[in-house]
Amino acid sequence: GAGVSQSPRYKVTKRGQDVALRCDPISGHVSLYWYRQALGQGPEFLTYFNYEAQQDKSGLPNDRFSAERPEGSISTLTIQRTEQRDSAMYRCASSFGLGTSGYNEQFFGPGTRLTVL
Amino acid sequence: GENVEQHPSTLSVQEGDSAVIKCTYSDSASNYFPWYKQELGKRPQLIIDIRSNVGEKKDQRIAVTLNKTAKHFSLHITETQPEDSAVYFCAAFLKGGSQGNLIFGKGTKLSVKP
């Protein structure tokens, strides 16, 4: 079946503009995660959802970043008043769920490359 | 919170040799340790994982070992091939409390020379 998809794949914006990044998880996956990955670095956790509930947003850098998943499927990561330091690859991942045994594999999307000029 | 250290940052081996990548974690409550391979321009993909109730796991040329007492785990690749060249990330998963997510190491760039 289809994997995790993200759109847009590339986004170039001017400093001060708002951007919305979309993630479409694998059908049936209840958990959805957002990461930021700088070049040459590992993914850095931002936030995650179980169904529509945001479980942990401790990784969001500041209050310009927010995320939602209103119907428990597609999620949007919004960055307001973008700054140059926000430039990075933003990846989402989904998993079937935490399950009773602890953890399920996270499947990553292709990412959105954000460039703030 | 959890912190994951990964070494080395780069590793170059000859085809056919073995490669070992090591990671340490800080939170003894972490209970799941996956390894991801990321080829240039591609998304990270899981190659092997291990849970805290197991000491070693093998899958063909790849193996992972876990030492809970020392809080470190390692990836072993035997008979390396050029297609093993990629960046490898270890991660630790801490369930419960305010965290339910993966904390990644900074990655190891593996180059396998023919």
Image: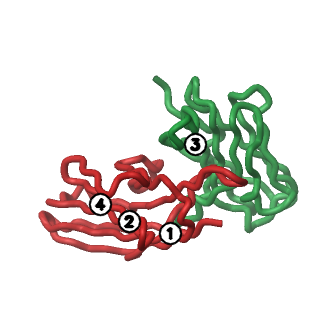
Q: Secondary structure at mark 4?
A: loop
Q: Which residue is mark 1?
A: B25
Q: What is the CA distance from the residue labelled 1 to the residue labelled 2? A: 8 Å
Q: Which residue is mark 3?
A: A93
Pointers 4 and 3 in contact (C-beta within 8 Å)? no
Image mark for residue A9: none
Quick one: label 2, few (<14), some, or many (20+) residues within 10 Å? many
Q: Amino acid at mark 1?
A: Tyr
Q: Which residue is mark 2?
A: B73
Which colour represents chain A?
A: green
Q: Amino acid at mark 4?
A: Ser
Q: What is the CA distance from the residue labelled 4 to the residue labelled 3? A: 23 Å
Q: Chain of mark 4?
A: B
Pointers 1 and 3 in contact (C-beta within 8 Å)? no
Q: What is the CA distance from the residue labelled 3 to the residue labelled 2? A: 23 Å
- The verdict on a common chain for dots 4 and 2 is yes
Quick one: label 4, few (<14), some, or many (20+) residues within 10 Å? many
